[in-house]
């Protein structure tokens, strides 16, 4: 018998359409479900910038079974954010990017063992150098988990970079920050310096090293698999914008 206070999982909506198809509309593309255009949670038309992205979103809807798993529809959710939220929160998102720079994953080098620290720097130092040269985001590395103050000019450069992106690219950028724990990796992905999936592997160097040496439980493996799916979705998102 279950406790009366136990919350029940929210039922998934039933699939109510036969097929999803991309359709061109004035100023962009949308996805239609049996001829009816999708709307965002704010009841705004789902207008996408490219046919490629519209096809990817339509494929996501066509992949649903008898029930619609909204949590698995990463592209649709990103589109909803880009349309409903980003236009009103651009400056807050730019500030969030700067905050990621202040504690960026690729700036925190392992104190020990030396093997891990060298492995991290082999991958992370070139990316920090790239961010400085390409975007004027020059970040200071440290050993350990305690953050070092980062140059104000670099944080401002990161904000300006974010504000220079369109709503859809900015959505992908902040999604990448959360996925990687790194503004540098997210910016590298948006700029095409790394693929989103390669950046994910770079972000988990420490995690992979620990798993190789000490093993990995099933829960950790499942979490990594889900994050890899998110990284693949981000790659599809950004390629679709190109």
Image (cartoon, rainbow, N blue to C red):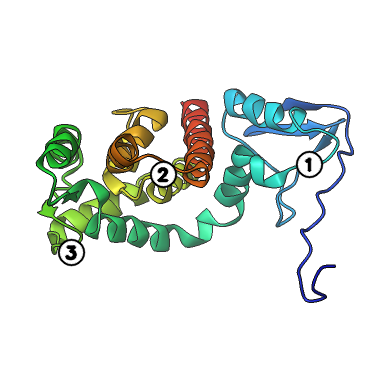
Task: Examine the image and state in which quarter residue 166 appears.
Answer: top left
Q: Earlier in the sequence, mark 1 or mark 2?
A: 1
Residue for badge 1: 68
Q: Position of residue 39 (x, y in %)?
A: 75, 46
Q: Position of residue 85 (x, y in %)?
A: 56, 57
153 vs 77: above or below: below
Instruction: Answer few, some or many: residues within 10 Å of disc 3's Cα (few below 14, many 20 plus, some between 14 and 19).
Output: few
Instruction: Answer few, some or many: residues within 10 Å of disc 2's Cα (few below 14, many 20 plus, some between 14 and 19).
Output: many
Residue for badge 3: 146
In this rendering, position of residue 198 left or right of residue 84: left
The label shown at residue 117 is none
Query: In which quadrant is the N terminus drawn?
Result: bottom right
Q: Position of residue 125 (x, y in %)?
A: 13, 38
Instruction: Answer few, some or many: residues within 10 Å of disc 1's Cα (few below 14, many 20 plus, some between 14 and 19).
Output: some
Q: CA distance from mark 1 to mark 3?
A: 43 Å
**Which of pointers 1 and 2 indicates the residue nearer the eye?**
1
Q: Earlier in the sequence, mark 1 or mark 3?
A: 1
Res. 65 in view: yes
What secondary structure is marked by label 2?
Answer: helix
Residue at figure coordinates x 71%, y 51% from the top left = 44
Residue at figure coordinates x 65%, y 41% from the top left = 72
The label shown at residue 176 is 2
What secondary structure is marked by label 3?
Answer: loop
């Amino acid at each position: 018998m279950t406790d009366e206070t136990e919350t029940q999982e929210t039922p998934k909506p039933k699939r109510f359409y036969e097929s999803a198809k991309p359709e061109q509309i004035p100023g962009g593309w949308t996805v239609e479900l049996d001829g009816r255009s999708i709307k965002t949670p704010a009841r705004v038309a789902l207008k996408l910038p490219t046919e490629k992205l519209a096809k990817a979103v339509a494929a996501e809807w066509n992949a649903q079974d008898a029930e619609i798993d909204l949590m698995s529809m990463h592209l649709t959710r990103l589109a909803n954010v880009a349309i409903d939220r980003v236009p009103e929160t651009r400056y807050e998102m730019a500030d969030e990017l700067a905050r990621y720079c202040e504690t960026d994953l690729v700036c925190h080098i392992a104190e020990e063992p030396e093997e891990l620290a060298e492995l991290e720097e082999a991958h992370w130092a070139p990316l920090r150098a790239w961010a400085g040269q390409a975007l004027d985001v020059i970040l200071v590395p440290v050993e350990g988990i305690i953050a070092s103050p980062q140059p104000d000019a670099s944080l401002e450069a990161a904000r300006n970079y974010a504000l220079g992106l369109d709503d859809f690219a900015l959505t992908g950028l902040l999604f990448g920050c959360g996925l990687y724990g790194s503004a540098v990796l997210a910016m590298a992905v948006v700029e095409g310096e790394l693929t989103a999936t390669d950046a994910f592997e770079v972000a988990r160097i420490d995690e992979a090293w620990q798993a190789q040496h000490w093993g990995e439980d099933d829960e950790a493996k499942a979490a990594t698999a889900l994050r890899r799916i998110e990284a693949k979705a981000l790659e599809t998102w950004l390629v679709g914008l190109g």
